[in-house]
Amino acid sequence: MANALIVFYSLDGDVRFLARSLARELQLDSMELELVKPHPTRGFMKYFKGGFLAATGATPPLRPLAHDAGHYDLIFVGTPVWNSRPAPAVRSFLKDADLKGKRVAFFTCYGDNDVKTQKILTSLVPGAKIVGRIGFKLPLKTDKERCVSDLVRWARDLLNS
């Protein structure tokens, strides 16, 4: 099996649930991105600030990372979709990480769709080989076990290719 890392950001828990389930099922290293200044988790500011930062392409500073993505052959990147864009923490990670020549696969959690987000994610990793994309609509509010099953099958296929 490939040497792989799961990198993710989650505010409401959907991406965290999927990423941790994937790491546990396939016994992969994982790291959750954390902002130096945490994002609001409730109320109007949660949505206003998140949507604004995502729309402007903000790259807020991250706390120190637990793993160096450069040491892995395949990097799975998980993000929620905010205002049709990846979460700013994921944008920060992708801006700072050198993923040239690496295999990269994206998974998203969304309420509407992730078409624009997937295009943006691809543009943020020049020189990387995009090997997969998958999205899940509100996994914690729908069939979360099926979402995990689909994610694990998808990831296993990428690991074995």
Image (cartoon, rainbow, N blue to C red):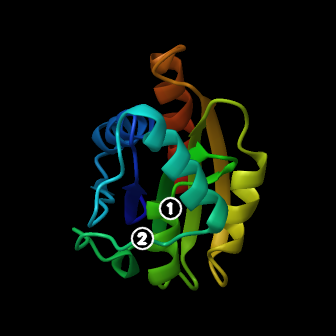
User: Looking at the image, which residue is at 66% across and 46% down?
Assistant: 83
User: Looking at the image, which residue is at 49% across and 72% down?
Assistant: 59
Q: Quadrant of the C terminus?
A: bottom right
> Of all residues shown, which one is farthest toward the front?
44
Front residue (pair 48, 78):
48
Disc 1 secondary structure class: helix
User: Looking at the image, which residue is at 57% across and 70% down?
Assistant: 103
Query: Is residue 149 left or right of 17 when viewed as pictured?
Result: right
The spot of residue 122 in percent (x, y) is: 69, 67
Q: Which mark is residue 96?
A: none
| Three-letter amino acid code at the position of disc 1 | Pro
Image quarter for residue 1? bottom left
Front residue (pair 56, 118):
56
The spot of residue 155 in percent (x, y) is: 52, 46
Task: Relative to 38, say whether 115 is above or below.
Answer: above
User: Which residue is labeled 1 in the image?
Assistant: 88
Residue 36 in view (yes/no)? yes
User: Looking at the image, which residue is at 45% across and 43% down?
Assistant: 45
Disc 2 secondary structure class: loop
User: Which residue is labeled 2 in the image?
Assistant: 60
The spot of residue 100 in percent (x, y) is: 57, 85
